[in-house]
Amino acid sequence: MADRLIYLPLGGAGEIGMNAYVYGYGPAGRERLILVDLGVTFGDMDGSPGIDLIMPNLTWLEENRDRLEAIFITHGHEDHVGALGLLWDRLKVPVYCRKFTGALARLKMEENGRPLDSLRIVEPRPAVVEAGPFRVQFLPVSHSIPESAALIIDSPAGRVIHSGDFKLDGTPVVGEAFDPILWHEIAREGRGVKVLTCDSTNVFSTHPGRSEALLANPLLDFVMGRKQLVVATTFASNVARVKTLAEAGVAAGRQICLLGRAMRKMIGAAVETGVLTSFPNTIAPEEAAKLPRGEVMLIVTGSQGERRAASAQLARGRYLGLELKEGDSFLFSSRTIPGNERPVIRIMNWLSEKGVDVFDADSGTYHVSGHANRPDLEAIHDLLKPQILIPMHGEHMHLREHMKLGRAKGIASMVAVNGDMIDLTGERPKLVDQIDTGRTYLDGTVLIGSMDGVVRDRIRMALNGHAVVSIIIDEDDRPLPDAWVECMGLPAKGRSRADLAAQIEAELAEFLDRADPRTVADDGKMDEAIRRITRQVSMEEVGKKPEVTVVISRLAE
Amino acid sequence: MADRLIYLPLGGAGEIGMNAYVYGYGPAGRERLILVDLGVTFGDMDGSPGIDLIMPNLTWLEENRDRLEAIFITHGHEDHVGALGLLWDRLKVPVYCRKFTGALARLKMEENGRPLDSLRIVEPRPAVVEAGPFRVQFLPVSHSIPESAALIIDSPAGRVIHSGDFKLDGTPVVGEAFDPILWHEIAREGRGVKVLTCDSTNVFSTHPGRSEALLANPLLDFVMGRKQLVVATTFASNVARVKTLAEAGVAAGRQICLLGRAMRKMIGAAVETGVLTSFPNTIAPEEAAKLPRGEVMLIVTGSQGERRAASAQLARGRYLGLELKEGDSFLFSSRTIPGNERPVIRIMNWLSEKGVDVFDADSGTYHVSGHANRPDLEAIHDLLKPQILIPMHGEHMHLREHMKLGRAKGIASMVAVNGDMIDLTGERPKLVDQIDTGRTYLDGTVLIGSMDGVVRDRIRMALNGHAVVSIIIDEDDRPLPDAWVECMGLPAKGRSRADLAAQIEAELAEFLDRADPRTVADDGKMDEAIRRITRQVSMEEVGKKPEVTVVISRLAE
């Protein structure tokens, strides 16, 4: 059987988050595999209440673990590396990444007690990692975190460029500038680029992307224009932004104080790995609290409205001895990720209640995106001239739009979502299989499947309430007349203005009194009847059918 | 004691939604009262799972019902009239509104079996409603629903203009155009305007508002440019928009089909009340399904991603015999209300999966807002020259920004949020009392208070799961050794890879075996001990402390 080159996204295709992309080369069904990225996404109350983290379902990859050569991590964002520590044990192969990413990956591995020697730090191109039939190089790209990389994945079937998350930035403040000559060179090597697997996040942004360096002056003007305390928030991993903010603060005559664990962790990792060669001196919160308000700038975590981050804490009350006051300024140097609007707006209103002036990045003055916009994507298509374009890192509408963009240039392209196995060997991509995917949840300390029913039950209890019915069947197999009903998350009283639990108990007592011995003897029938009565009484009384748990205790042996 | 003029928002101030504003005039504590608007807001999974509607808490008004003269409804949007049917019974006073609003209010009253003769239809100014010490006129304003009105509320302490929701639109397509001369006249009558209570929704929009009429040409161009089926969604109550969309469809040679109950209800009410004098002929869905795709335009409900509305149904599958296909176009002629991003994006992705091209109103080409923007608010301040400005209809940050805008012009202003009683008699507004407010929930068919704990329990079950423990104490006051544990919304297995419920049962069996008779005799102590053990085992096993319900059955009398 002829060898083939395959692509199989397990996460990140048809969604923005939990990236995990498999490539394979070899005879069908026996391809040697590599995995690119292993990220998380975050749950929400709507779809996954109580869930701490959401990860790709690796079942297929575990079943084919003997075929897996290595994991490559493009960069250190949570949606690319966040699941590494939790899931590495299921794969147990070497992990390759660049130095800064490695510093973050190391923390993930340590937290979960994974062997650190499986982490291999790689220099960028021309260094090559051999992984089965693949030869992989890390190609530096600009993004909103240091040392992002695209991957040059060479296989006997040709060259794949896996873009990772990227933008075209000639002046990225921290890290390597976009180098079109280098990209041109890569496009011309050997047989050129067979496949471009490409970030689609900003395909709907029609203006060319803007450089990180453009923010220095507006941010300086902003801080200069403030008289009282200035607070700025951004993603801690956006080291370039944190640096620009800090330098603006210093240039405006202020002392800088970093707040939030992630902020200190990221800047620490950046200094330690040599990514950040200069950063202004910072002061501790206790010191900041003692200085006049006009001489301090806080740079804090929590730009997405996270409940426990520094932004939320400061907005609600005192935090580490610091308190915001009338006339202070709070800058969101960040974009609100769709879905996080409510928590961010909540913080803005808390700040408003304190009399703090809030500035957001909606105008674009105080924020630039880390992803390539539509014209930048077109520029990369033109530069790399791939035979095939596979859009990734996007919801379905982003992937489809990106596909159309590629096709309009005559590039073969298709939408591949999580679970779609695509054969890239021929001139056009071809769907050859569909793998069951789904998601893995971290719930407390346990990994569960998204289809296990645990979360479904939580959502049902949240929407409908939960009624618990306890019944005792005596030694003579007769039910005791008193059913005991406890309601949780249900109105205490309904239409008849009497206690809902008592109403259900009364109706159940009647049923138990009349119940056929054959029904009583059968747990299944009892459960069904009790459930039905409970839901019916509740529906009549309060207009809701609760979830019902029936506990039947039989005193006979 | 001197008479005073008071203002007390019970909803809508410090939030966008569930508007309810009280005005009073008379001796302190004995003011005669009127209520302006009685709206709802919608719940979400984050804060109010399972709740159907959220309304103001009217406790204070009920306690002072003998002082309440009347209710005035400014317009027919749900956040202004939605709670009328549900809560009227608590107030039982006449309800005044204009004709179109009345047609919608009537439906609310009917649904809840309220007496229709309490509804009084009022002509606009110069008609006057006398309500205790108040003389109230309805002043037509433009908004995104027909026959919106500001209220001119004259009291012995002076004139209040309660703006309602409004924009300045000289060409509103349906309904009365903004008439600056009329407003000028109102400002000059008598002693002028003492208080302007004013819509703050768009205070952060810095460009002048745009007229509804501006959309006709872009919408026509849009429809003309499509070859296959065209679907457009907007709020059904935006009758002018529905008309503009339908006329664009007809001009482009298409037949119009309205989908969604609200769409037909609103257009029906608009025709019936004479608000809409011309509207293109429409066809039934069955007819539309038979026509060539290029000859049909659907105008549908569900612009906010509502799960059961026509947009969602069409995006997911067939609906009334209609099915979207590759190459069809779907236009959101609407803004996504903050918080609704996720459901709207979900629909866009479903449409993308069907190959439908989606167009949103982000660019402003296909949508204009129904609220006055910042320059329009300034124009109204200048026109009315109020002594006092009270910002309303906004979250805290909107109210504060609006206050600053007023103060910058030398107008006395303050932020008043729900529950703040403001004395408007003097030159400056003064906080004189704070009323406990909160919210009333419609849960199924029952009204409950937001602080009743019902929703809190639901959220806790959703986040932590629910463990139910059933214990039997025998006739001799000894616990039976077998505790019965049922877990809902908890992982089946944890750290020790054994069944979680069985692990808890084992630990409880040990406790029951050793339990002191005095503990066993005491329900409270038993409950506490069992709860503690259950949470502890669960924490060790799965890293979560569930909600626990303990049912203790005592066989002794």
Image (tube, coloured by chain):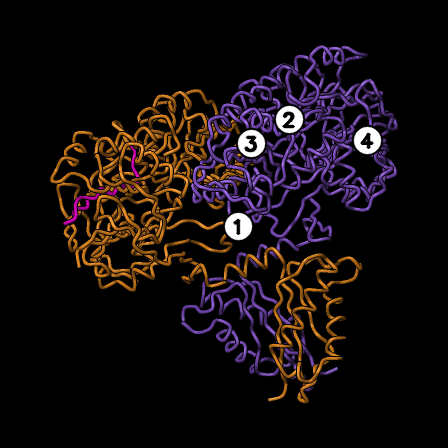
Chain colours: A purple, B orange
Query: Which residue is depicted at the point 76% across and 63% down?
Result: B499
Along the viewing direction, whichever of B143 and A209 lies nearer the viewer: A209
Identify whether B320 is placed above or below A370. below
The quarter of the displayed image where residue A157 is located = top right
User: For residue A389, what is the image quadrant?
Assistant: top right
Q: Secondary structure at mark 1?
A: loop
* Magenta residues (range): B153-167
Residue at which label 1 appears: B46
Report whether B43 appears left or right of A193. Answer: left
Residue hosting label 2: A240
Q: Label 1 vs label 4: CA separation?
A: 39 Å
- Of residue A62 and residue B553, the one placed in the foreground of this image is B553
Total count of labels: 4
Determine whether label 1 and label 3 are within 8 Å by CB: no
**Is B534 inside the magenta-drawn segment?**
no
Figure quadrant of the N terminus of chain B: bottom left
Foreground mark, 4 or 2, reads 2
Q: Are marks 4 and 3 in contact (CB under 8 Å)?
A: no
How many angstroms separate mark 1 from mark 2 (CA)?
Answer: 34 Å
List x then y, in percent, for residue A1. 87, 27
Secondary structure found at label 3: loop
**Amino acid type at mark 1:** Asp
Q: Which residue lies under the disc numbered 4?
A: A96
Residue at 22% from the left image edge and 33% from the top image edge: B176
Q: Check if mark 4's residue and mark 2's residue have beta carbons within 8 Å.
A: no
Instruction: Give the Cα distance between marks 3 and 2.
Output: 13 Å
**View extreme (left): residue:** B190
